Amino acid sequence: MYRRCALLARARFTSVPLRSDFSLDADAMLEAIARDRPVLVWLACPNNPTGNLFDASDVERIARAAPGLVAIDEAYYAYADATFLPRVLDFPNLVVVRTVSKIGMAGLRLGYLAGHPDWIAEFDKLRPPYNVNSLTQAVVPLLLANADVFATQAGAIRAERSRLAAALSKLPHVQMFATQTNFVLARVPDAQAWFAALRDAKILVKNLDGWHPLLANCLRITVGTPAENDALIDVLERR
Ligand SMILES: *Cc1c(COP(=O)(O)O)cnc(C)c1O
């Protein structure tokens, strides 16, 4: 999506591959930053579709080296152990963007950005009028008043995530990756066949095989309800 949005804005786009363990290749990032002098750097923390949180010191190095704005995309903040939000003013070029989509409110189309007031003033010059519609705005006080409900729900999903990952890691020849999101990433022996078996059981997961060489035979599995997770584990255990 970052690439697509950049192209829509007629901007040049450079991407830097992660290491094979999906960690940030900070040295390669710094090289690319020195070479291309980007006006904007995006870092999804935690990352989608790999699920991992990038090393905070790598993010800091990138923020210090970048000549322009660094946007930390915290779409999965509710499922992560760390955030840059309280530190956003420690760097003159950092903003944190969040969305309520991944806490179960994707239909609201609501997101927010935190940063230095000087940056906010610049963004306000570009923000289209009424970019957050009035019905969505009317829901915001409800979201805030029920923050504990959303936190409880995220906690339940995190607990189910551990259970799901533990069950999948017991399957032969399955590699699980560390996740700080509401999904787990699994490398399986044959992603196409596993995807098809789940689809036949009316369970839809994301087959990432073919997206990028690093994601060969990887499935992204969103954590469901306990019953949904049991159904998925059951299909895979019987393979
Ligand atoms: C889902 C997601 C978003 C934003 O989703 P919206 O529904 O457009 O708010 C942003 N970044 C990442 C990494 C995501 O996974």
Image (cartoon, rainbow, N blue to C red):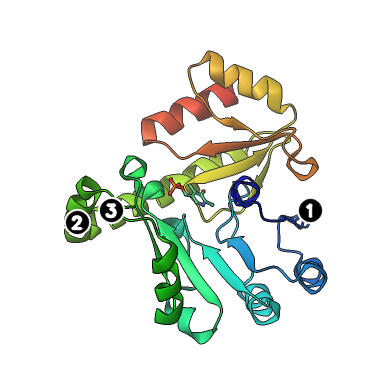
Q: Are marks 3 and 1 in contact (CB under 8 Å)?
A: no
The answer to the question of whether label 2 and label 3 lie on touching residues, with beta carbons closer than 8 A, is yes
Depicted 65 relative to depicted 222: above or below: below
Q: What element carries label 2?
A: loop
Question: For this rendering, which residue is in front, 201 or 2?
Answer: 2
What whole-number distance in Å separates the C-alpha atoms at marks 1 and 2? 40 Å
The residue that appears at 60% across and 56% down in the rendered structure is 52
**Are the residues at dot 1 and dot 2 in contact (C-beta closer than 8 Å)?**
no
> Is disc 3 placed on a helix, strand or loop?
helix
Q: Which residue is drawn at 51% across and 44% down?
A: 183
Q: Which residue lies furthest to the top in this view?
A: 200
Looking at the image, residue 34 sits to the left or right of residue 1; the answer is right
Spatial distance from mark 2 to mark 3, Cα to Cα? 7 Å
Question: Which residue is under mark 1?
Answer: 20
Q: Residue 150 carries which label?
A: 3
Secondary structure under the numbered disc 1 in the rendered image = loop
Q: Which amino acid does label 3 sit on?
A: Phe
Q: Mark 2 points at which residue?
A: 146
Q: Which amino acid does label 1 sit on?
A: Ser
Amino acid type, callout 2: Asn
The residue closer to the viewer here, 177 or 166, is: 177
Q: Seen in the image, is 187 located left or right of residue 116?
A: right
Placement of the C terminus among the 4 image quadrants: top right
Q: Quadrant of residue 120?
A: bottom left
Report the residue at 54% width, 22% height from top: 235
